[in-house]
Image: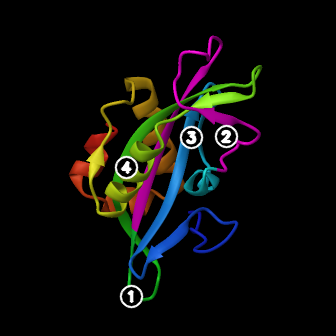
Amino acid sequence: MKEFALHGGGDGERITDDTLLTAIIVGPEGARLDPGAIHGRSAAETGIQFVNTPEPLSRGVRYAVVWVSVELSAEGKPVRYKGLTACTMTVDRSQGTGHKPFAEHVNRMYAAVKGEMITAVLTSAERAQVQALLAAQDPALWQASPDAFRQAVG
């Protein structure tokens, strides 16, 4: 079982006394935890200048950004996965540009913190990758999570 680090450089960021937020990036390389996405600094975003429209990204690659909140106990220990929302971005490394709707990313991040489940943009393969990653990250946390959470990626 992997412990979640609560601040700086770990697997997430403590948002409130009882909530940790982390991010998963799902792309051609598969799904991986990348809490740098919380501040727009995921590995997929590094070195990319984001533009307002996706049209100029002829060779863009689609990434799903999945925001995951974790409920914490009074002692700051993870209790269960709480919220899960997803949105997309497109990155064209050859041009050094990308597109992501910033407002949607912020709103989805906030929705995950509140415990909402919004996963319509995920393909069935992406859902399976997210499910496998979260279940492997901490099986006890996965089992303690609400049915709605597990079904959001099931």
Tell me: residue 135, above or below residue 16. Answer: above
Q: Position of residue 2 (x, y in %)?
A: 59, 63
Mark 2 or 1 closer to N-term?
A: 2
**Of the pair 95 and 9, the residue shown nearer to us:** 95
Residue under numbered circle 2? 45
Judging from the image, what secondary structure is the residue with disc 2 in? loop
Residue visible at 70% across and 66% down in the picture: 9
Residue 42 image offset from top left, x and y in percent = 65, 47
Report how far apart the C-alphas of labels 2 and 4 lie in the structure. Answer: 18 Å
Q: Are marks 3 and 1 in contact (CB under 8 Å)?
A: no
**Front of the two marks 3 and 4:** 4
Residue matched to label 1: 74
> How many other residues sit within 10 Å of disc 4, few (<14), some (14-19) or many (≥20)?
many
Mark 3–mark 4 distance (CA, rounded to whole Å): 14 Å
Tell me the number on the disc at residue 60: none
| Residue range highlighted in magenta | 41-70
Position of the N terminus, as image quadrant, is bottom right
Alpha-carbon distance for marks 3 and 1? Answer: 29 Å
Q: Circle 2: is it few (<14), some (14-19), or many (20+) Cα within 10 Å?
A: many
Tell me the kind of residue under disc 4. Arg
Tell me which residue sits at (26%, 42%) in the image: 151
Which residue is labeled 4 in the image?
A: 108
Which numbered disc flags the more N-terminal residue, 2 or 4? 2
Q: Earlier in the sequence, mark 3 or mark 1?
A: 3
Q: Amino acid at mark 2?
A: Glu
Q: Earlier in the sequence, mark 3 or mark 4?
A: 3
